[in-house]
Amino acid sequence: MTRFPTHDKKLKEWVNKMAALCQPDDIVWVDGSQEQKLILQKEAISSGELIQLNQEKLPNCFLHRTAIDDVARTEHLTFICTRRRRDAGPTNNWMSPRTAYRKARAIFKGAMVGRTMYVIPFSMGPVGSPFSKIGVELTDSRYVVLNMMIMTRVGEAVLRQLEKEDKFTHCLHSKAQLDINKRLILHFPEDNTIWSVGSGYGGNVLLGKKCLSLRIAIYIARKEQWLAEHMLIMGIESPNGRIDYIAAAFPSACGKTNLAMLVPPDGLKKKGYRIWTVGDDIAWMRVDTDGSLWAINPETGFFGVAPGTNSQTNPNMVETIKKDTIYTNVLFKPDGTVWWEGADGEVPSEGIDWQGRPWKPGRLDAHGRPILGAHPNSRFTTPIANCPSASFRLEQHHGVPISAIVFGGRRQHLLPLVYETFNWQHGVFAGATMASERTAAQVGKLGEVRRDPMAMLPFCGYNMGDYFRHWLNIGRHMQKPPRIFHVNWFRSDEKGNFLWPGFKENLRVLEWIIDRCNNKVDAVKTPIGYVPRPQDIDMTGLELPKGTMDKLLEVREEEWAGELKEIKKFFKQFKKDLPAELWEEYENLASRLKSYE
Ligand code: GTP
Ligand code: SPV
Ligand code: MN
């Protein structure tokens, strides 16, 4: 008989019911304690789920390898299960709840035989904050438990809060056979329930993250009049000591983590800028009584992309991941440390690759492509508290006030380095028409341009037409709405080289954004929005080839014809569910472009 550390009847009944389905040998409640964490780590090492890394060089760090076909979110196996198909909308995979439960139940049945079922009570957001939501995840993976302990607030205090609210998101996960043909990531927003089976990869199994904090939260947020978004949150402290906060939505693997903890480039450092990191992936935002938008990061950790992380691109992250970190699918070095493509230092002469095979640099696969040491979507899980730029306002129950919302995508052509939209409605249009080239964060063809409104295409738990309408409504509730901008760090020349150096230099663009918010700088009006005058981007200490800035800021009317066509095609699929305001913005843009020389 399991002892239940809670008197909450609904919770007890649900745990019993799920245990009856999955048939674990044992049930263990996760209390968030250090003692329990050490036991779990030890067990995970002996079961092979974790490899202990060199504890002198990387204290309290571990390595995990997933199955070879389980390395990124599998969007084609991810479903929104609402009673009406219409409520999932044209951009989501839909399954009826009845079918979904039936299919998944067959896979969950007996899936935990011979295993322990862990019960993880967790809070997204500071426990007890009006922003926060509670979930309970049941899982048979120690890797999941240890990751959740980094990414969320876990333990006793959460249970007490849950008992008060008597409401929580029911999250059930089992690795089952880790079989891609028996993998389902199912969301039941009408039941406040998530069922994930057959995977061991982060975004599919850390159910507090994308599944709860976006796909389920966005559904709750519409009812409760707030926003759940795929956004980083950062504070930019100006030389005069004022901190302006921005929230920025870029699709997966398009630079949120890097921007959120940027270290000012030397030229601007002289002015005294400082960055405060609030979050790198998810923002929950509410209109407060002062009429402006306030945001929290519901998470307590980063689940960041490893490749490309080094002291040039992201020195704060390099510092953060030196301890208390779980690495997934990176290269294991003979000295018990880790490496990935684009890491600091020399390329190691040998190691064990992410698939567990002996590795040497320079080897090619059957197609003549280099065999990578780390998977392109290899990641680390690490506590925000260890980040040198962590904001002192992370635990504040009311979050931070947002001055600007920034949308951005990975676009080789067309989109200038930055532009400001004319007003909230036009800003929503800019967000709704965002597009980006596909990255390794999701399974599929790399480089293909796809529409990814507000970076939420894979995470919008209901009809996207309704989501756009909700955004328009939120704007009407604010006396002081944030200004909305669009950035593109990835514009390229004819040869495909990036025109803009990116990373820390992006602060130069953020400076312009903040100056616009504070009415300190002029701009040039173009058909798509306001772009900077070249002289208004501070280039102290950064030299670009002559003419580059003009190319970065250029709006080329002739290129926009194709884009308009694509936008129209995208909008049309929503039929009557697309708000009329967005068609109006479309027509306005088309006519502004027509009369533009
Ligand atoms: P998710 O965790 O998947 O949501 O990704 P993310 O948006 O946090 O992306 P991240 O910051 O991890 O960056 C992903 C990739 O983009 C890395 O390979 C970076 O090297 C690259 N990147 C980030 N910022 C820039 C930039 O300013 N310019 C260029 N060219 N590349 C960048
Ligand atoms: C993303 O893909 O946007 C991520 C990683 O942040 S995952 O948790 O897998 O979704
Ligand atoms: Mn993300």
Image (cartoon, rainbow, N blue to C red):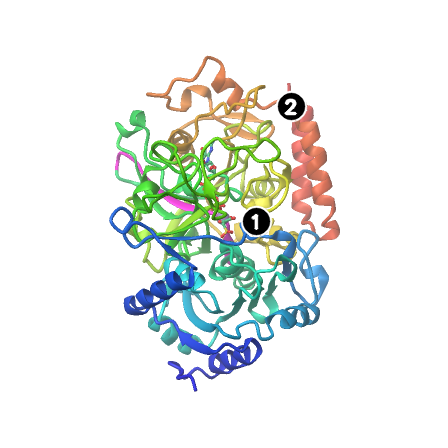
User: Which class describes the residues within 10 Å of circle 2: few (<14), some (14-19), or many (20+)?
Assistant: some
Viewer-side residue, 450 vs 27: 27
Residue under label 2, please give it.
557
Residue under label 1, please give it.
456
Note whether 245 is above or below 348 in the view shown.
below
For residue 406, which numbered disc appears in the image?
none
Q: What residue is drawn where x is 50% and y is 54%?
A: 66
Find the magenta span and give its range.
226-240
Q: CA distance from mark 2 to mark 1?
A: 27 Å
Quadrant location of residue 148?
bottom left
Q: Is residue 282 left or right of residue 107?
A: left
Can residue 393 be seen by looking at this rendering?
no
Image quarter in which the C terminus is found: top right
What secondary structure is found at the residue carrying circle 1?
Answer: loop
User: Which class describes the residues within 10 Å of circle 1: few (<14), some (14-19), or many (20+)?
Assistant: many
What secondary structure is found at the residue carrying circle 2?
Answer: helix
